[in-house]
Amino acid sequence: MSQKLSHHDHNGRTHSKDNHERKIACTPTIGDYALLGDILMERLLGYETMPCPPLTKRTLELGAQNSPDMICTPFKITLGNHIEAAQAGANVFIMPGAGCRLGFYDILQKQILDDLGYPNDIISLFDYIPTTKRLFTAMQERNPELTQQQFDEVFALIIQITVDMDGLADYLRHNRAFELEAGQFESNYQAYLSEVKLAQTAGEAADIGKKYDKLLRAIPVDKPQRPIRIGILGEIYVVVEPFSNANLEQWLMDRAVEIDRPFDLTRMAIGIFNNEQQIAESGGYVNYNIGSTANDVIAQTHRMMKEGVDGVIHIKPASCSPEITAMTILQNMSQDFGIPVMYLTFDTETGEAGVHTRLEAFLDMITMKRQSADRAA
Amino acid sequence: MKKAYLGVDIGSISTKGVVIDENNQVLASSYLWTQGNPIDAVKRVVGELDQTMNGAGAGGLAGQYTIVNSGTTGSARKLIGLVLGSRVVKNEITAHAVGTLSVVPDVQTILEIGGQDSKIILINNGVVMDYAMNTICAAGTGSFLSSQAKRLDLELEDFAALALRSENPAKIAARCTVFAESDLVHKAQIGHSKEDIVAGLCRAVVLNYLNNVGKGKQIKGPVVFQGGMSKNAAVVKEFERELGLPVHVDPHGHLMGALGVAVLCKNEVQESAFDFNITNLEFETRGLECAGCPNSCEMICVYREGQLLDAWGNKCDIGASLTSAQAA
């Protein structure tokens, strides 16, 4: 629809001069979270929204080609998202802000999109300080008629959906590997996402969440007493976006593995306020704030190891400094608990064979270890 | 007819095959260069094994055994697993650990440096406890040393003897191939002798391995060193010095991956007989790029006697329909 209104010039750039006022917003693909961006844009600003073009090799190429070489991978992929969306007619883009270097993504991406000649408005949602002030201001600048009450209602809806979808997905990761009829969890979860997208209030969203929670829990599973359980954590983007991590959760779940993956948007949002608590829960492995999610990576790994997880997979994009800090501490923890940790780094390469070789070896190892422990017991 | 098991390890540089009996004893083995053509290499390996297993002359076992299961490992394991009709297709790490344990049951650390890969496997009481593998970079592997040998106009076989003559190895940056190479040129130009430079390179390989692959791992004896690099006595000596432990190199170390899958085949409940006749069959692979979306998946179709056996590389069903169209 938007393509009708735009035309490509001889450089392949898209211009929409003929309809300058028309705002079309596109949220980059980050797991299933784009629907939250769509709700913000539609309900608070009255913008049209466009689904982000699917992540492909071309997205990576466009992103890498137009990014500084040494920047972290999520920057490159989301920039690729913006460019492909701009070519399809989008002119408003959303970035979460806060965190580590993530907090500066929007500024640099705007510059790059300007240089490439794509009309754009990038909205950065959050500040380093844990309030919604920046989000409210950003929305009000673009829609002067927006009231605090309207904002609060939509924000409550966003929070409700985030907490519910993360809760459902967490249940899915613990159980999907053992479903009796393949595809039931995924189809129910997808049905939840399309239904909750239409919820008008937090109350409505909560009802939909409860309905699907029941449906998910009613799916028959054949889960052994002690299935092989693997913890997955690390940098949030590569953790939640399967395209960026060779879809490793799926690969493991297809092989009857229960996944404990504590990192999602809910945890990130709460985590920003909770560095002190994470340090306290780290079992003495961290004594001061080491930045971004690294504190929580340590605290959560400590929890999983105490609970007797079979193995932990730590993943990060190339050059992610907070996670590099966490790795050295995880090595100590791995030795103290005698639980293996595998480290994987993802960049814009697309070969999955190497990742699958390592995953298979890791799974073989922890399975054989478990069998030998069971024989000894 | 006695039972036997075939394991094949198809690496980037070499292809190895072994046949074992029910007591893990090696009945036949073969070791050849892959030369960029894994299907051809495996046919040659199987041909050699056939001679030993079924040959009537000296050393031939005259068909006393029948191979009841076959398995593959190494980077071409999927392709060759299909060609051989193998029941076991295993990653190199598991295969090496299982193979080595069948020969050295009390091994605690396996160091392995191959053509492109290097890995470390830590074992406790016969169970793999931890492993690590080089990630994106091939620095410090066999291909690095062979390219430096070329630069110095040396045969790789002469490398170790020359290095062992050095009394003062040159310091060569171990972190990265590019830095190591410019370091090497620099040392040569300022007058270091060839043996010192070669010895420095061997040490760089060891330091690179311990700093990258072995980082943070507790290396305990018995230590077994495998892969093509273990044939280099100077590298072995550097490992012993750095670790302060004796490092065992088995003359059959290069066969451990193949041996490992053969042992795994033996543990399989189901049998699927192997036929030496595959050397007479025509196998062909065709690459194609799916144009269904901008992912442009690179797909491989494998044919036996002109019939499509299998295809892979596609991420979605669009690619699958493409291959079924090819099969029609």
Image (cartoon, rainbow, N blue to C red):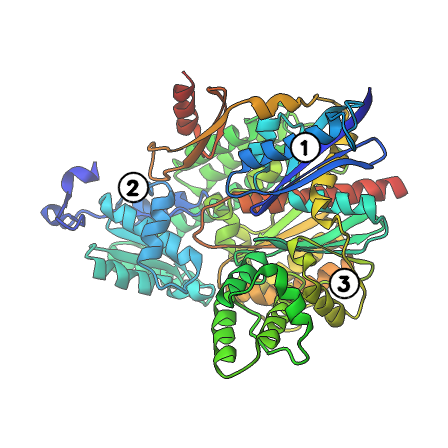
Residue A357 pos. (x, y %): 60, 44
Q: Residue furthest front?
A: B57
Pointer 2 chain: A
Q: Nearer the viewer, residue A215 or B79?
A: B79
Q: Is residue B3 visible?
A: yes
Residue A115 is left or right of residue B11, and the answer is left
State how far apart marks 3 and 1 are (Cα): 30 Å
Say which residue label 2 marks: A50
State how far apart marks 3 and 2 are (Cα): 54 Å
Say which residue label 3 marks: B219
Residue B114 is left or right of residue A82, and the answer is right
Does the residue at mark 2 contact the one at mark 1 (Cβ under 8 Å)?
A: no
Q: Which residue type carries mark 1?
A: Gly
Say which residue label 1 marks: B71
- Please identify, in this view, whether the residue under mark 2 or under mark 1 is nearer the observer: 1
- Please identify, in this view, whether the residue under mark 3 or under mark 2 is nearer the observer: 3
